[in-house]
């Protein structure tokens, strides 16, 4: 199955792109997608770790399964002062 990954802020900088398609096996979870991205793009490993995840604009847990054509977004933690 294919899902669309969108990158924001530090993730966009680390990946060097705004979005990409990711092919995953049927039934893959958000956590498995995160692990695959970190493996394929080592620069993403550290910035991905603390990120929240959202599928189709809804926050989800790492064990949430993905479906064909889902949009998966990892949201970096917000900093402030």
Image (tube, rainbow, N blue to C red):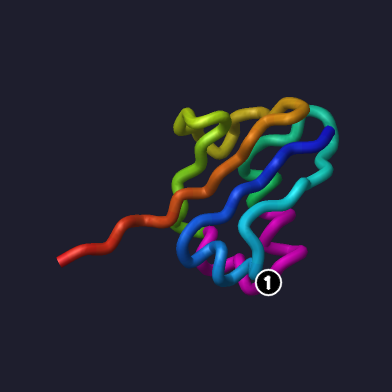
User: Dividing the image into 4 quarters, which one contains the N terminus?
Assistant: top right
Q: Residue 70 magenta-drawn?
A: no
Q: Is residue 4 left or right of residue 49?
A: right
**Tag 1 residue:** 42
User: Dividing the image into 4 quarters, which one contains the C terminus?
Assistant: bottom left
Please report the residue visible at 67 percent of the width from the left and 36 percent of the height from the top.
29
Please report the residue visible at 64 percent of the width from the left and 51 percent of the height from the top.
34
- Depth check: give the residue in front, 62 or 72: 72
Above or below, comparing residue 55 to residue 44 in the picture: above
| Percent x, y of residue 50 | 44, 57
Rate crowding at label 1 as few (under 14), some (14 to 19) or many (20 or more) other CA atoms within 10 Å: few
Q: Is residue 58 left or right of residue 12?
A: left
- Depth check: give the residue in front, 17 or 30: 17
Q: Residue 42 magenta-drawn?
A: yes
| Percent x, y of residue 20 | 72, 52
Please report the residue visible at 63 percent of the width from the left and 73 percent of the height from the top.
43
Secondary structure under tag 1 reads: helix
């Amino acid at each position: 199955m294919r899902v669309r990954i969108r990158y924001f802020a530090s993730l966009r900088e680390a990946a060097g792109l705004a979005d990409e398609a990711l092919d995953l096996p049927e039934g893959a979870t958000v956590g498995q997608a995160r692990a695959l991205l970190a493996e394929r793009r080592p620069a993403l490993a550290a910035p991905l770790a603390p990120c929240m995840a959202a599928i189709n604009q809804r926050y989800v847990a790492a064990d949430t399964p993905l479906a064909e054509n889902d949009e998966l977004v990892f949201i970096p933690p917000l900093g402030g002062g």
